[in-house]
Amino acid sequence: MSELYSTPQPFYYDKKSGFTQEEFKHAIDKSSTIYVGYLSFYTTEEQLYELFSKCGEIKRIIMGLDRNQKTPCGFCFVEYYSKEDAADCIKYINGSKLDERLIRCDWDYGFKEGRQYGRGLSGGQVRDEYRTDYDPGRGGYGKQRQFEMDQFGDVNGGDITYQQQILQLQQSQQQHQLYQQANAGGPQNYSGKRNRGGDDDSDSFKRQRDNNGSISAGNTPNKGRFRERDEEDD
């Protein structure tokens, strides 16, 4: 009977876990948490409860979210109260269909705050960055493929990479910003003070203020136009 609940070796060692390989293996051995992958973006928490509760009482389900948009991005963590129930989940639910998709269940070392967010460049899962297929359940094309289609038309491959495309766009934006700064005199020359003209005009302006107590619009000396400093992009 003990063989039924033996913990299989994890598929990979998560270097971002903060554990050594030995500590990681020990955490897996005592864990009752399951990582569920290949989910549709549209699968709900209620659907997950309905399916995974068939193997035992669930402590909680943590939905995986896009780091930027805070929307589901195709994975979750299922915590059971007992390791036996988690082992049944691995045995019976791994490879089953949910929302017409074959889902994957693996042992997980335990949920920590922050792990619910995708690790991909754009905020979702890494696998969705580089997919070239069209998957309607996971947002259509992968981020790289969609980027190529948006920026360069419907291309397939080529000499330019996804990272190079992003770098080129960033360089183009920087050049445009430098051009604007050059035409405006550059924000680096801004002293934080308004331009009130030459020293003579300034002295005359002060004398008028001291003599009259106030200044009318008609007596105000001609001042240079003040331009607010351009804000830099984030």
Image (cartoon, helix red, strand yellow):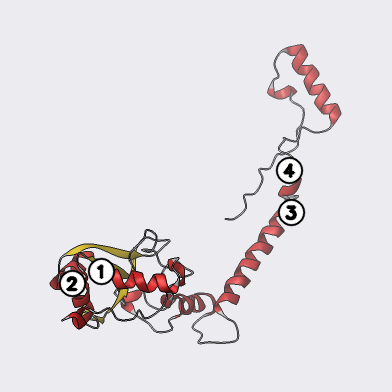
Q: What residue type is labelled 4?
A: Tyr
- Pointer 4 or 2: first along the chain: 2
Residue 32 versus residue 215 in the image, above or below: below
**In the image, which disc is placed on residue 32?**
1
Look at the image and tell me in which quarter the C terminus lies: bottom right
Q: What element carries label 1?
A: loop
Residue 84 showing in the rendered view: yes
Look at the image and tell me in which quarter the N terminus lies: bottom left
Q: What residue type is labelled 3?
A: Asn
Q: Is mark 4 on a helix, strand or loop?
A: loop
Which residue is labeled 3 in the image? 183
Q: Which of 227 and 115 is in front in this view?
A: 115
Which residue is labeled 4 in the image? 190
Q: For the residues marked 4 and 1, what is the alpha-carbon distance in whole angstroms?
A: 60 Å
Q: For the residues marked 4 and 2, what is the alpha-carbon distance in whole angstroms?
A: 66 Å
Q: Is mark 3 on a helix, strand or loop?
A: helix
Q: Contact, CB < 8 Å: mark 1 with mark 3?
A: no
Residue 125 showing in the rendered view: no
Q: Quadrant of residue 49?
A: bottom left
**In the image, which disc is placed on residue 85?**
2
Of the two numbered discs 4 and 2 in the rendering, the one whose residue sits closer to the viewer: 2
For residue 107, side relative to residue 181 (left or right): left
Q: Contact, CB < 8 Å: mark 2 with mark 1?
A: yes
